[in-house]
Structures are given as C-alpha cells and as structure tokens.
Amino acid sequence: MAKQNKAYKFRMYPTDEQALIIRKTFGCVRFVYNKMLAERKETYECPKDDKEVLKKVKHPTPAKYKKEFEWLKEVDSLALANAQLNLDKAYKSFFKGNAKFPKFKSKRHKQSYTTNVVNGNIQLLEGRIKLPKLKMVKVKQHREIPSEHKIKACTVSMSSSGKYYISILTEYEMEIESKEIEKVVGLDFAMDGLFVDSEGEKANYPKFYRQMLEKLAKEQRKLSRKKKGSSNWKKQRIRVAKIQEKVANQRKNFLHHKSKELVMNHDAVVIEDLDMKGMSQALKFGKSVADNGWGMFTSFLQYKLKEQGKQLVKIDKWFPSTKTCSKCGSIKEIKLSERTYQCACGLDLDRDYNSALNIKKEGIRLLASA
Ligand SMILES: [Zn+2]
C-alpha cells in the first residue's frame, strides 16, 4: 500500500462577514511572513559568508508577534504557522541553490492561506465546509471526494477578480500494481504548442484558447492606456483578471485532457528533465515558457501515470536529444533556424520529431537498465 495525495479545488461562497475574516487572514499571514523574513534577513545579512552558522540561528515564530500584535489572535493560528513553514521551505530551497532568496510578499501576490486538520476542526458536509474561525462556508462541490480520502489541509484563496476558492488536500492509501511496460512514448517540449511526440504528432493548444489569448492581450493593452487608479481603469482591471482566469482554466483543462490521453495509450512516458526557470531566462522567452504550461502538464502526467502503476521517465537535461540522429546515432550541431534534421545516413526529419524519437530511445534504455 502506498500513500497518495490528491487535491480538490472548489469555488467557495463566503458571506460578507466570512469574506472579511478570510481577507483579514490573508493580511495577517502576509504580515507574519514579512516580519519573520525581515528578522531572518538581518541575521542573514550580517555574517554573510557562513551559511552553516546561519542554519543554526534560532528563528522567529508567529507566537512571538502575537504578544505585540494582539489582532493576530483573531485569525486562524494554523494559517500563521503555515506561513512559518513556507518561509522555512523558501530558505531551504535557497540554501540548496534551487531558488532565489525569499522575497517579501505584497498584496499583489496571490492571496491565500493554508490551514490543517486538527481534531475535527475542518469538516466537509453537504454543500458546506467547516473551517477554523469561519464556521460553515458554502461551497460548490462539483465532484465527490471518495470516502476513503482523508482531508489533511485546506488552502483558501481569492482570485484577482474577487472569487473565493478552497483547495482540499487529501491523502489515501492505494494498492498499485506496476504495469508491464510495452508502449512507450517520448515527448519533445515545444515552445509553440506543448510537445511533439515520438509518433510525430504535435500537441497544439486548441483554437479557442489561442483566440482567448489574443483577446487577453487586447484587453491588457486597453488597460495600459487607462489612467491608473481611475474608475475605468479599475473596471478594465477586473475584465482583464476575469479573462486571465478563463485562460488559466482552459489551459488546465487542455493539460488534463492531453495527459489523460497519453496515460491511457501508453505504459511509460519519457520527457526531458527541463529546468524551466533557467530556460526562460537563458532563452529570453520570459513569461511565455511559464505560460506554456509544461510544468503543470508534467505534474499531471506524473500523478496520472503513478495512479495506474505506469511510469514517467525523466532523462538528463544535458542529453543531446536535438543534436543526435535518431536513425544512426551520430551527433552534429543543429541551428535553431534549421527545422529539419538532415544526416549523412539519409535521415531527413522534422527536428522536433527527431528529438522525440531520441528521447523515447533514451527512455527505453533507462527503463531497461533500471
Ligand atoms: Zn544519421
């Protein structure tokens, strides 16, 4: 038996009074996070060179601030405790070299807080959820959570257009039988669209999605021409936020659909272990790499495959998938402008298709040697 996690996200409809408490909690979490960060920053900035010493420094906790700032007691204390955990995590990944130094949170960040299940403080009932400090909040539960799933934590968030959501993290035990691997597919990440697979198929975003992106760009241009802070600007900002939410939903649906399709038809999926952050910086694609949804897509693939005892194989990011001939295995430089891979052995193939074939081969090699 293996423990699995699954999150369910639902729209939430708090009363005005509850919404006020929720927003207050966002503020308190941010306040505590920033306070702790400021204190830890001081200790970080004095003995700059000794990371080992820094790791041993005793860190501030939310409890410390409650004496000084009484109003912190009015909100869910677990939410404040989670702010501390998040900051610890941010520091850890900074020390490991996986992330930049933690930043202060501003109101412009995604507004959210996380709370945990302790002694029945959280309960999901018919159309309602009981949450600390809020009591019963109305939710639109569009899908059932299986009874064997145990709720572990909940994250309350507010979108920039002012909608409230709750993401319920559950844990359950599952018996997974490993599937025998017969059908393997390799995916080559594609900047435009999503990927090209080792059968030569391109996964392109649907037309309605691309149209929505165009609409978003248009409305964003309109927003930039309006006077900041004016009532027209405020109206337009909400319009933009609503389209952004729609775009994000469409993208997510598409990624769910594509990953489901792949998992249904294959026993193992091979991808390159790409460092998206590094890549978008190096290639100056900036935001578009993140918007492309590759990271979300691979996480969907990962859990969908795992649920069925199938495998996601990640090959080394330095593997020369683009430079290798998928027919004879020779390696050569290929310019970004060359759309096909042409080799002395006679191979003449779309460059992404060629890469996907190499990725598949490398994946099979790794699976065989595991
Ligand atoms: Zn060749």
Image (tube, helix red, strand yellow):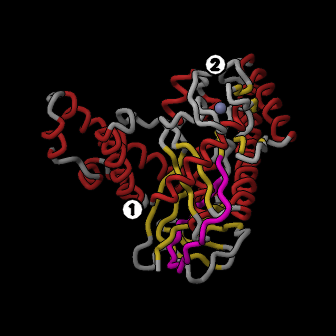
**Residue range of the region highlighted in magenta in the rendering:** 164-186
Relative to 352, is 89 above or below? below
Q: Percent position (x, y) of residue 178? A: 55, 73
Dot label at residue 78: 1
Name the residue at 26% across, 33% down.
Answer: 41
Is 285 above or below relative to 137?
Answer: above
Quadrant of ligand 1 in image: top right
Please say whether residue 180 is one of the residues in the magenta stretch.
Answer: yes
- In the image, residue 235 lies at what x, y percent? 76, 32
Q: CA distance from mark 1 to mark 2?
A: 53 Å
Whether residue 84 appears in this view of the structure is yes
Where residue 43 sits: x, y (%)?
19, 34
Q: Main secondary structure of the magenta part?
A: strand
Measuring from the top left, give residue 240's x and y in whole percent.
Answer: 74, 34
Q: Which mark is residue 335?
A: 2
Label 2 element class: loop
Residue 31 part of the magenta segment = no
